[in-house]
Structure formats: structure tokens, C-alpha cells
Image (cartoon, rainbow, N blue to C red):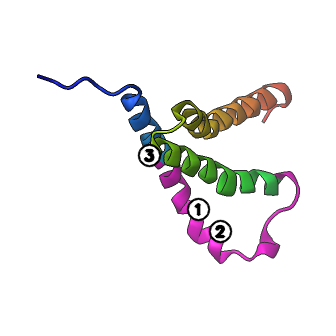
């Protein structure tokens, strides 16, 4: 007889997979980031975008992964892991709107 699936077990696995993909997409940036001196980084909005991609998104993915591994607060973990894809889709939409308004 098959054992009944635990509640949210598929959600937990999906959270861990998405967090793993986000962390793997972050790894290729590391050699360049570690070899570039701090004085060569841009300032202002580009620096904010760079820090978001390199620090905030991986931290959110790690937090979501940790919560999913511990089987605690899976909805929060799903929200944390979903921030990066949503932010990247919204930035692509904003770029498309800017191109439509001002041209390329």
C-alpha cells in the first residue's frame, strides 16, 4: 500500500529546485567579481542593481532553501525564492516599455 504524500512535499521540492537554479545562475559571476577591485565598480543606480543581483538575490535564495530544508514556513520560502524571477521579468518589461516609448 502506498503511503500518503505529506502536505506541501511537492512545494518543498519545487522551492529547493528553484533556489538551487538561482544559486547556480549566480556562480558564473563570482570569479569576475572577486578579481575586480572595488574602485572599478560603477556608482549610483548601476551599483545598486549589481549589488541586488550579486548579494540580495542569492541571500534570498539561500534563506528560502534553508526554510524548505527545515520544512518551516513554506509559503515564506516560496515568496523569497520567487523574488528574483519576478524582479527580472519586471525589469525586462520595463526595458521593453522604455524601448517602445523612446526607441532603441
- Expressed as whole percent of the image width and height from the top left, the position of residue 95 reads 75, 34
Q: Which residue is mark 3?
A: 69
Label annotation for residue 63: none
**Which stretch is magenta?**
20-45
Compared across the picture, whether 98 is left or right of 4 comes to right
Is residue 34 placed above or below 65 in the rendered structure?
Answer: below
In-front residue for pair 14/66: 66
Indicate the quadrant containing the N terminus: top left, top right, bottom left or bottom right. Answer: top left
Residue 100, image x, y percentages: 78, 25
Observer-nearest residue: 37 or 86?
86
Residue sitting at 47 percent across and 37 percent down? 15
Indicate the quadrant containing the C terminus: top left, top right, bottom left or bottom right: top right
Whichever of labels 1 and 3 marks the residue nearer the N terminus, that label is 1
Image quadrant assignment for residue 32: bottom right
Q: Bin the neighbour count of mark 2 within 10 Å (Cα to Cα): few under 14, some 14-19, many 20 and up.
A: few
- Above or below, 26 against 71 in this view is below
Q: Residues within 10 Å of mark 1 (few under 14, many from 20)?
A: few
User: Relative to residue 38, is residue 93 depicted above or below?
Assistant: above
Q: Quadrant of residue 80?
A: top right
Front-lying residue, 86 or 5? 5
Q: Are marks 2 and 1 in contact (CB under 8 Å)?
A: yes
Relative placement, left or right, of 76 versus 16 is right
**SS class of the residue under badge 1?**
helix
Give the residue pinned by disc 2.
33
Question: Mark 1 against mark 3, which lies toward the viewer?
Answer: 3
Amino acid at each position: 500500500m502506498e503511503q500518503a504524500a505529506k502536505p506541501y512535499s511537492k512545494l518543498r521540492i519545487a522551492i529547493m529546485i528553484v533556489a538551487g537554479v538561482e544559486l547556480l545562475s549566480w556562480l558564473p559571476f563570482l570569479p569576475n567579481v572577486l578579481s575586480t577591485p572595488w574602485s572599478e565598480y560603477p556608482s549610483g543606480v548601476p551599483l545598486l542593481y549589481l549589488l541586488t543581483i550579486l548579494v540580495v538575490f542569492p541571500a534570498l535564495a539561500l534563506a528560502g532553501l534553508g526554510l524548505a530544508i527545515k520544512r518551516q514556513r513554506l509559503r515564506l520560502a516560496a515568496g523569497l525564492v520567487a523574488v528574483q524571477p519576478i524582479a527580472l521579468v519586471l525589469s525586462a518589461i520595463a526595458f521593453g516599455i522604455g524601448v517602445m516609448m523612446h526607441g532603441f
